[in-house]
């Protein structure tokens, strides 16, 4: 896997270097809210049910949106560890991530407008199994954190442009 | 639903106003990378498989981490529209969201260190079915965008603290 992955990375880097247009990717999602806070979302062929726990007014039929942020960050860290370990020739047997995030719900509920609605802080532990020494692993961590897409998205501002459209009926707008 | 939801929101606001400690919530995730880029992540009782598409070196057994960011934002917008419509007494029959995000993969692949690894920009359309007039819907949109947790997380910096730990074996660290 590791040698194969390293070759894939090197080939991809060469392709992007010679033609930066090839590196431009667009990802998409389409979701539609059903009963209560339950939503179904499609990302290409992959579908997911999102809901709120009962304590927040939902029926707990899936993870909630802020839990998905943690899932995105944890898995992106893992994937980036595997990719950079391969690229840098650092042994990595296994990687697993636990994350927790604090939210002051007075923000979402507009109880205090000085409280942000999103996470105040995220904390996580990345556990690796590797025969590499500490210094090498610290170098790997630095490379990962400089290139992990979701860590960048969460840590730094992303411009978001949202347009509101009024439709005549729900049928035309359901997630396909 | 709408009247019931409005009561729930008002009661929650009163509870948080009288005891801000009740509003402090912590969300968690635990993930573990398997073969290649395939990871399994747990958020409370909810489990999800995350992977990369074949074009990015995976086996496409689930959405990838940056697609989960779109899923989180779209569903969070929808939930916040439903909650604020109920709270403000604005009719809302249906809401659905499509999103797209642009990534220049030269960032992740370290081809150009001036390119960010995360989304350059997100664009989306929120489609609502409502008997409310445009001015009222614009007011709703403003309230939603000021209080949507994931829009805040993506649009503004969240401090992230990640600790790297070396384990002796994978068994101790797998997602429970």
Image (cartoon, coloured by chain):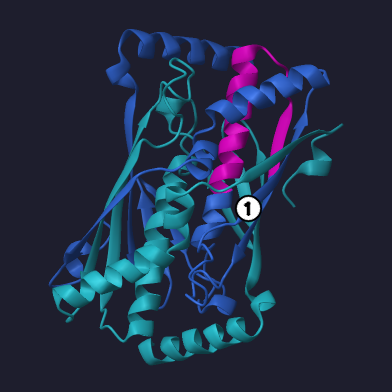
Chain colours: A cyan, B blue
Residue A137 placement, left or right of A28 = left
Q: Position of residue A110 (x, y in %)?
A: 49, 18
Q: Position of residue A45 (x, y in %)?
A: 64, 63
Compared to residue B69, the image places residue A161 above or below, namely above
Per the image, the residue denoted by label 1 is B121
Compared to residue A156, the image places residue A102 above or below, namely above
Residue A54 placement, left or right of B114 = left
Give the prevailing secondary structure in the magenta stretch. helix
Image point 40% across, 70% down: which residue?
Answer: A80
**SS class, disc 1:** strand
Q: Determine which quarter of the picture holds residue B26.
A: top left
The residue lying toward the viewer, choosing from A172 and B163, is B163
Image point 33% across, 40% down: which residue?
Answer: A121
- The chain that hosts pointer 1 is B
Give the position of the N terminus of chain A as an image quadrant.
Answer: bottom left
Q: Is residue A157 magenta?
A: no
Q: Position of residue B148 (x, y in %)?
A: 54, 32
Q: Position of residue A22 (x, y in %)?
A: 67, 77
Res. A129 visible in picture: no
């Amino acid at each position: 896997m590791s040698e194969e992955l390293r070759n894939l990375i090197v080939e991809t880097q060469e392709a992007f270097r010679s033609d930066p247009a090839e590196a431009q990717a667009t990802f998409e999602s389409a979701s539609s809210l059903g009963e209560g806070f339950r939503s179904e979302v499609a990302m290409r062929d992959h579908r997911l049910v999102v809901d709120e726990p009962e304590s927040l007014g939902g029926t707990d039929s899936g993870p909630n949106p802020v839990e998905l942020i943690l899932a995105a960050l944890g898995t992106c860290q893992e994937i980036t560890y595997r990719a950079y370990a391969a690229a840098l020739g650092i042994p990595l047997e296994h990687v697993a991530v636990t994350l927790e995030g604090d939210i002051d719900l007075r923000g979402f509920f507009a109880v205090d407008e000085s409280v942000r609605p999103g996470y105040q802080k995220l904390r996580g532990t990345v556990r690796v199994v590797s025969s590499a020494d500490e210094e090498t692993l610290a170098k790997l961590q630095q490379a990962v954190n400089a290139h992990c897409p979701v860590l960048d998205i969460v840590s730094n501002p992303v411009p978001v442009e949202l347009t509101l459209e009024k439709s005549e009926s729900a049928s035309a707008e359901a997630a396909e």
